[in-house]
Amino acid sequence: MKKHTLILLTFLAISGIMARANAQQTLDQNKLYQGAVAKEQIYKVIYQMDNASPEIIKKTIRNINNLLKDPRLKGKLQVELVAFSGGTDAYRKGSEYEAAIKGLISQGVIVAQCLNTLEERKIDKSELYDFLAYVPTGNGELVIRANDGWTIIKP
């Protein structure tokens, strides 16, 4: 019985030493890792904004701005922001987001609004900023973009 115990203890000790060595190797690798390499010529992404929550709207705009600042993706991005449902509130004249949305457009972001939402909610285009693009449906835009290879992000 003692022989088996000794073998088991030896195995456990070796396993512990190996686990610590592997953990140290992983820590060292993490220190060297600088993220994925952008190997493609173009990266296409569409952000889905369908929530009226100010926190979600601000997060969406912040996420897009952060993406546009990523040095790995400079000059390689096509970005669209499509609003529907509650997200339409961000595009209403007088909203606190006008400057931020114009800032996205100035960086080449397509900023689009779903016409279906306007019809369903009885919102006239005159109630929204005049610098918006329009799509027939937000979901249709997402489906088409996805099938064209675009990444969909819903913050």
Image: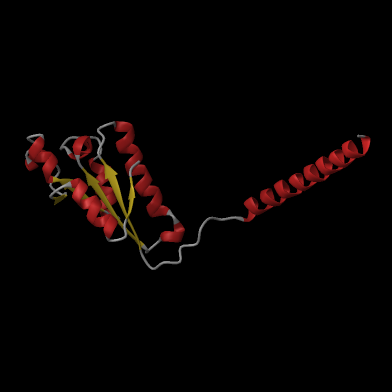
In the displayed orientation, state which residue is furthest to the right.
2
Write down the quadrant of residue 110 in the picture: bottom left
The foreground one among 59 and 120 is: 120
Quadrant assignment for the C terminus: top left
Write down the quadrant of residue 60 in the picture: top left
Q: Where's residue 37, x and y in %?
A: 50, 62
Q: Where's residue 54, x and y in %?
A: 29, 32
Q: Where's residue 65, x and y in %?
A: 36, 48
Left or right: 21 as drawn, with respect to 148:
right
Looking at the image, which residue is at 53% across and 55% down?
35
Left or right: 119 as drawn, with respect to 37:
left
**In the rendered image, the vertical position of residue 151 relative to residue 38, given as above or below:** above
Please count the marks in the image.
0
Left or right: 18 as drawn, with respect to 142:
right
In the displayed orientation, state which residue is furthest to the front.
1
Q: Where's residue 124, x and y in %?
A: 6, 39
**In the rendered image, the vertical position of residue 113 relative to residue 45, given as above or below:** above
Looking at the image, which residue is at 78% across and 42% down?
16
Residue 108 appears anywhere in the view? no
The foreground one among 99 and 28 is: 28
Quadrant assignment for the N terminus: top right
The foreground one among 46 and 89 is: 46
Residue 90 appears anywhere in the view? yes
Looking at the image, which residue is at 10% across and 40% down?
118
Give the colour scheme of this rendering. Answer: secondary structure
Looking at the image, which residue is at 36% across and 43% down?
62
